[in-house]
Amino acid sequence: MTRELLEKIQKAIRHENLDGWLFCNFRHRDRLADQILDRSDSLANSRLWVYAVPARGEPLAITHVIESGHLDGLPAGTRRCYANRAGLRECLVPLKEKRWGVHLSEQITAISYLDGGTAALFSGAGLILTSAESLIQRFKSLLDRAQIESHERAANGLYEIVESVWDFVCASYKSGAVIYEGDLRDRMEDGFVRRNLVRDHPPLAAAGKNSANPHYDFTGKGSMVQAGDVIQLDLWAKEVDGIYADISWAGYYGKNPPKEIEAAFACVLEARDRAFDFIAASFAEHRPVTGAEVDHEARRVLFNRGYGEAVKHRTGHGIDTNVHGSGVNIDETEFPDTRRILEGSCFSLEPGIYLTDYGFRTEIDVYIDGGKALVSGGAVPLTGSKITRLQRALLEL
């Protein structure tokens, strides 16, 4: 870790008014700690190590005597080793009576890696523990200019891919060709390769009743797409070492979708647009806004239209170098996220409705740049944008 990175960590600590950020790991259980401190998972980690970064000054590195070199390469004013439990407690003495951000959260499970036993050890040694959830967001998930540009390139690539896939769907319908879910997924995968984009899992292609499963997956060719099917596409990818983009489109394999499907899809669009408008207005009025508050607005639209029982997931998730990133989630109920949406935040908006015979969601990505909420894939306001028009057109062959 460079001095520049250390200064960035300490700046985040000071923003959150904490005394420091306490990193630790055992058997590489905390992927965030390894990722932030650039610790390879090939390094032996059979004993607990601790790396305490204060708001100002030099870090303290604590390792076991048989793995004393694990934190080599990290800046440290003091390096201590222990051989037993009493020795570990002695090493922790300089940290007592200070407020430390740790990877522990009652509500945001995705960043809660610190086990209860180690937390009790720290507390028993006199450390004051508080969740590092806001620290993590501020350090890892607020995009700078280069990262925004990387995210935009990925988003533009995804929109090109999904339009190409839908052109294939339309042509197949008109010619009467037989197509399978696997054909759609293969075309998305080919699009990633041609654009030098990478992903952590194959994209989703679901038709008919399969679209009612938000995390549907299949092997082989999957199901055949049939007339009258709702088609759900969900694709995410990034440049190597870049920032992910993540979008979802829904379509109808036929010329005249039933009014029931049109009404449900219109409601999902309304919920998505309400979430965006609420964020945009909050920033225009310089009013703090949290992920939970945005989810509440979108969820209210769906519930007021009578679709409450068909809502199975939150409205969105943070996006950074991971598709499900460490920043603010648009979530009031699953993993309630009361962190504020900040300058540089990037996240999805993807409300969905899942009924017995079909389901769909419409997903866009949004980031905050210059105090404004922008939709990825063109950096334009949502209302009247190409995204709204194209997603509505997906219901028309």
Image (cartoon, rainbow, N blue to C red):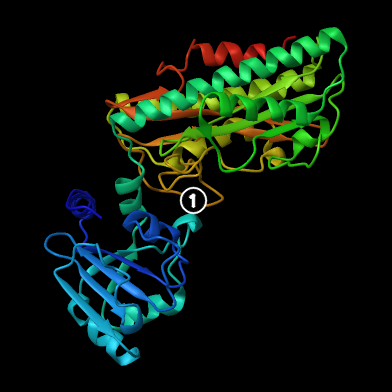
Residue 127 vertical position relative to residue 154 in the rendered view, above or below:
below
Question: Residue at image x 83%, y 22%?
Answer: 179
Residue 270 vertical position relative to residue 287 in the rendered view, above or below:
above
Question: Residue at image x 56%, y 24%?
Answer: 194
Q: Secondary structure at mark 1?
A: loop
Say few, some or many: other residues with alpha carbon within 10 Å of mark 1 (under 14 / 14 to 19 / 20 or more).
many
Residue 299 vertical position relative to residue 131 in the rendered view, above or below:
above
95 or 74: nearer the viewer: 74
112 or 158: nearer the viewer: 158
Specify whether residue 143 is in view.
Answer: yes
Question: Residue at image x 73%, y 15%?
Answer: 168
Specify whether residue 245 is in view.
Answer: no
Viewport quadrant of the N terminus: bottom left
Q: From the viewer's perspective, tell me whether residue 357 is left or right of residue 14.
A: right
Q: From the viewer's perspective, tell me whether residue 10 is left or right of residue 114.
A: left
- Taking the view exactly as shown, the residue that stands out farthest to the left is 57
Q: Position of residue 228 (x, y in %)?
A: 85, 20
Identify the amino acid type marked 1. Pro
For label 1, the residue is: 336
Viewport quadrant of the C terminus: top right
Q: Position of residue 265 (x, y in %)?
A: 68, 23
Q: Position of residue 147 (x, y in %)?
A: 34, 33
Q: From the viewer's perspective, tell me whether residue 235 is left or right of residue 49.
A: right
